[in-house]
Image: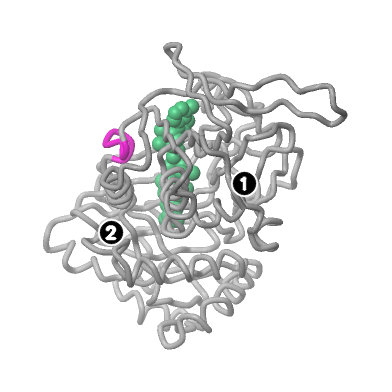
Amino acid sequence: MALPSHIVIVGGGVFGLSTALALTKRHPESQITVVDRGPIPDPAKWPVDNSRIVRADYANVAYSKLATIAIERWRNTDWGRNGRYTQNGLLLMYPDDGTSTKEYARKSYDNVKPVGRDNVEFLPSKADILRAFPTADSDRLDVAGGYVNWGAGLSDVTASLRFVKEQLDREGKVVFHTGYANRVLYDSPDDRPGSKPRATGVALYGGLSIHADLVILATGSKTWTGLVSLRDGTVLTSRATAFMRVSDEEQRELENLPTIHNIHTGICVLPPRDNCLKIARCTYIYRHETPVNASEEDFTFPGNVVPILATDAFRTVLKQLLPQFADRSFSSLNVSRRAESPKADFTVSYHPAYEGLFLAIGCSEHVSKFFPVIGDKVVDALEGSLELELRDLWAWTGGPVPVSNGEDGEDRF
Ligand SMILES: Cc1cc2nc3c(=O)[nH]c(=O)nc-3n(C[C@H](O)[C@H](O)[C@H](O)COP(=O)(O)OP(=O)(O)OC[C@H]3O[C@@H](n4cnc5c(N)ncnc54)[C@H](O)[C@@H]3O)c2cc1C
């Protein structure tokens, strides 16, 4: 299917660049502009936090299948070269009383086992977990079982953004523009029944406008701040990630350990990269009740509740898994506020209320692993050829949707 000749993508993150790359290959005749408020990649955005978990371990088989395609590209093409992908494995574990988390692990195991074959090993007891993660403190470890997938890995998100940006610069088919889009431009609907306003471009702070026949918003978790109303389609949350410096010797000792994900607490421990150990709570830890279209200034925490909750939880995890680090200071603690999709699903869909406006929005903190493949899926959706299961999963919700509490091993990492 032909696409319009002038396309503007707002956002040069994972979604935006992957989409730009796929468009240059499949619609080389289109003129594509990518607008981002900062440099791509922005060194201020991810100064240390580059590691992203790459896994096909999803309880939802549609994500599992898509991740399998992405992993094949991370492993066997230029995407994964020069340290952009390393394969260290992923260990999912659940505690004694975690019936729903055990169920999640079972579904996820069933989905990856046929793909991972010998790389996936069920660990039915605490003793088995200790075999796969020998640094853990056997007395303190609160775990009943899990499984390890040695075929999962880590990607470097900043290096991957740089890799794609350089490729697009070399090919010269995409124009990059630095600027903050503050408004989508529309023309008025005509008199025909059912006629909708048509997106005609974006206005940037400073007065410049970029005109296009198709506007793609790939603006990530801050989309709620104004370009389009996500209404009840997102929840506002806070997440925390902590970092700890480790010595060269500690790095060598730990770097080949699998990433750990405790499905019950939602906390992940990532083996160190560049002498930095990372601990993150992959389910959100605080849900805000602020209306979605509130300004960012309204979006405040009650006291220091998030950092305190997070550091307490991280220390408990370290005591169990890496006791030698339990009392070491964190070198930094990032608390980020964001809009998240209530069920961790992306929105990849035309906006129902406007012509020529398309949403390619993750809002769910698990997009990075799909970098090599997500742009192809966006272009499939633009062309109307996206497979049915993904079309249903990523449809525009627009209105109230059931919010899960994010604590049952949901797909948010
Ligand atoms: C702490 C953390 C840990 C994560 N861990 C994992 C993981 O382990 N595995 C995994 O797969 N994923 C992970 N993710 C998720 C992944 O990194 C994000 O989902 C992904 O980067 C989102 O990509 P995006 O393109 O949707 O948004 P972004 O990367 O946020 O890109 C959006 C871009 O749009 C630009 N922009 C926004 N608004 C405007 C505007 N109005 N005008 C101009 N430009 C604008 C921004 O500058 C930005 O460059 C993690 C994310 C975080 C924050």
In which quarter of the view is residue 148 placed?
Answer: bottom left
Q: Looking at the picture, does residue 310 appear above or below residue 356? A: below
Residue depicted at x 26% and y 56%:
325
Q: Is residue 309 visible?
A: no
Q: Which residue is mark 2?
A: 84
Find out whether residue 24 is within the magenta segment: no
What is the CA distance from the residue labelled 1 to the residue labelled 2? Answer: 26 Å
Q: What main secondary structure does the magenta stretch of the protein show? A: loop
Q: Looking at the picture, does residue 112 appear above or below residue 322? A: below
Quarter for ligand 1?
A: top left
Q: Which residues are magenta?
A: 40-46
Amino acid identity at mark 2: Arg
Q: Nearer the viewer, residue 200 or 271?
A: 200
Q: Nearer the viewer, residue 78 or 123?
A: 78
Residue depicted at x 33% and y 59%:
155
For numbered disc 2, what is the local secondary structure? loop
Pinpoint residue 46: horizontal percent, then vertical percent: 31, 40
Residue 325 circle label: none
Pinpoint residue 92: horizontal percent, then vertical percent: 47, 70
Amino acid identity at mark 1: Thr
Residue depicted at x 69% and y 34%:
355
Q: Is residue 147 visible?
A: yes
In which quarter of the view is residue 249 placed?
Answer: bottom left
Pinpoint residue 11: horizontal percent, then vertical percent: 45, 36
243 lies left or right of 308: left
Q: Which residue is mark 1?
A: 347
Q: Nearer the viewer, residue 75 or 199?
A: 199
State which tag comes first along the sequence, 1 or 2. 2
Pinpoint residue 254: horizontal percent, then vertical percent: 23, 67
> Callout 1: 10 Å neighbours few (<14), some, many (20+)?
many
